Image (spheres, coloured by chain):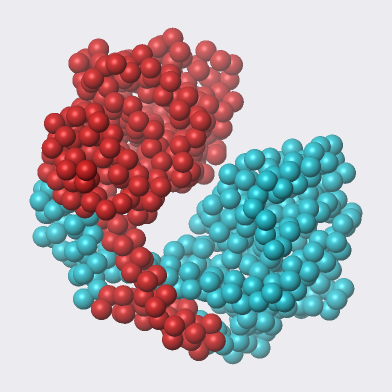
Chain colours: A cyan, B red
Amino acid sequence: MRVDELVPGVLGGDRRAVARAISAVEDGGEGLEELSEGIFASTGRAATIGLTGAPGVGKSTLAAGVVRVCRARDLRVAVLAVDPTSPYTGGALLGDRVRMQEHATDPSVFIRSMATRGHLGGMALAAPEAVRILDAAGYDRIVVETVGVGQAEVDVAAATDTAVVVLAPGMGDAVQMAKAGILEVADVFVVNKADREGAHEVVRELRQMLHLGAARDWDPPVLTTASTEDEGIEAVWEAIESHRTHLGATGALGAKRRARLLREVEALAAERFRLEVTSVLEADEELASALVDRRVDPYAAAAMLVGKAAG
Amino acid sequence: MRVDELVPGVLGGDRRAVARAISAVEDGGEGLEELSEGIFASTGRAATIGLTGAPGVGKSTLAAGVVRVCRARDLRVAVLAVDPTSPYTGGALLGDRVRMQEHATDPSVFIRSMATRGHLGGMALAAPEAVRILDAAGYDRIVVETVGVGQAEVDVAAATDTAVVVLAPGMGDAVQMAKAGILEVADVFVVNKADREGAHEVVRELRQMLHLGAARDWDPPVLTTASTEDEGIEAVWEAIESHRTHLGATGALGAKRRARLLREVEALAAERFRLEVTSVLEADEELASALVDRRVDPYAAAAMLVGKAAG
């Protein structure tokens, strides 16, 4: 079956078609262009929620909480757990899926781990396409859960409507997060495991750091949860929904999505061009030799390549 | 003074010209192409050494040890301390420079911290150009010291002739390093602070992991140092020199440098193209609107952009 033959299934919300389409995105093989073309007009309806935080803070339990809240409101919900730095899905993510088993038989819940094995530009470009597939399949809310707190994770989380940053006492401090640029992209902060020692300090430290930052028209709330007992999860949900309402009311949602889309297209174009450059340079023995013999310097060679690959 | 007017100074080994040329690379401003063109033919003589490891393992003390060994052999040596993730040089690097003060008045030693403020493609592309400046200025050995152990750091360290990975007991374990892909790029391992508890375990763990990997024609040695007392530094030096001799003897040095140069040029071309894409997309209201209105999907838009920016 060709990838683009999955389009009707995806649009009809067929779980198997959705799963296979996301696998195709992971693999980065042929037919992705047709798949993208087939589903794109049906996207833009879902609200997307990013969940970022250090390993062990309880992102998955929080994701499970969001799933429960969604189901109580009869909303269809998908969770996409992405690992931007690893080409293969590790054990942690599989563990998370097991934790979600209470929803395994619910047709309105879709849970999926994702890695990239070949998509152009890696997870930064594969994840948005997977989100569009889920969006086109009719999920009302799409939770994008990332592993780790590096730049790649921050980028993926920032490419959602509402970025939720999760912390826990003793699990990576706020200063580290500030260095990763996470304070700037977060719309909602959740301090999980709030029943543990040190939780109040995390909340206080976070509020101080936020206070030091530039004033924004949305003031990111700092909430606490003890998510194993579902404590606080309703407040988190309301903060997420409030944020999205705020974005919609101020016109920021459209602007944010537009900017995100343009940046994504730029990156896709640059990656595609890079492939062309590589093949041109591989074929151009003369230019390669001129470089190695130091007759043409790297900047000049790059300028030549742009011309050649372009032509 | 224009950047390209620094060329004679750099080639003559003038410290101020070298320092200003590296600053120009950091800033990524105009004249870099001319600077690159002016110095490129005079590069390729220096041996480059990468020093990577988690913060606190003692990379800088090791770098200082390498400097002392070089000076005892009457070799000119430069140390470039790069921080790929931060746009500005932080306190840690300044501290490192202070530790190097014993060499502050030695004209055959050049020590410099480096960050990027505007170079196309960030540190991954700025660092090799700074290394070429030092190479053209006549330094025999160039030590590239990185901060942290993320992907960016691994990439910078891997872009040297000999990549030295530094560990210390209790400071980031071998499993973490393996995940970052550092085992594959390391040519020499140094377990520093070998007088501390746990050092033997680090050595053993490392040897086990190396044993599990694929056989390579160079077997990376695992050495120990207690670098505050200069213990073991001579053995590290000999391992570095042996590795380079090995590369030269097998023809791998030329192949490695050639591959590195081609990859760098590809990345420079892709970055340059990305700038063009951005300006084309900014000017092309029609394409942007078609994307936002979902009439053209991201993959199709990227393909169109490649054509337009190219033309």
- Quarter occupied by the C terminus of chain B: bottom left
Residue B281 in sight in this render:
yes
Answer with the quarter of the image where residue B16 lies. Answer: top left
Examine the rendering and report whether any part of residue A4 can be seen: no
Position of residue A164 measured from the top left corner of the image (x, y, whole percent): 71, 59
Q: Is residue A134 above or below residue B142?
A: below
Q: Residue at x 32, y 57 (%)?
A: B267
Residue at 62%, 54% (x, y): give it. A184
Residue visible at 44% across and 15% down? B227
Write the residue at 46% across / 41% down.
Answer: B88
A243 with respect to B55 (left or right): right
Tell which of A221 and A93 is nearer to you: A221
Instruction: Pinpoint residue B300: horizontal percent, then vertical percent.
Output: 42, 82
Q: Is residue A161 above or below residue B244?
A: below
Residue B29, image x, y percentages: 31, 51
Is A250 rendered above or below residue A202? below
Instruction: Specify whether A21 is left or right of A236.
Output: left
- In the foreground, A162 or B189: A162
Q: In which quarter of the view is residue B302 placed?
A: bottom left
Q: Position of residue A21 (x, y in %)?
A: 56, 77
* Image quadrant where one finds the N terminus of chain B: top left
Q: Left or right of A53: which side holds B175?
A: left
Q: Is A199 left, or right, of B203 in this rendering?
A: right
Give the answer, above or below, for where B103 lies relative to A62. above
Q: Nearer the viewer, residue B289 or A2?
A: B289
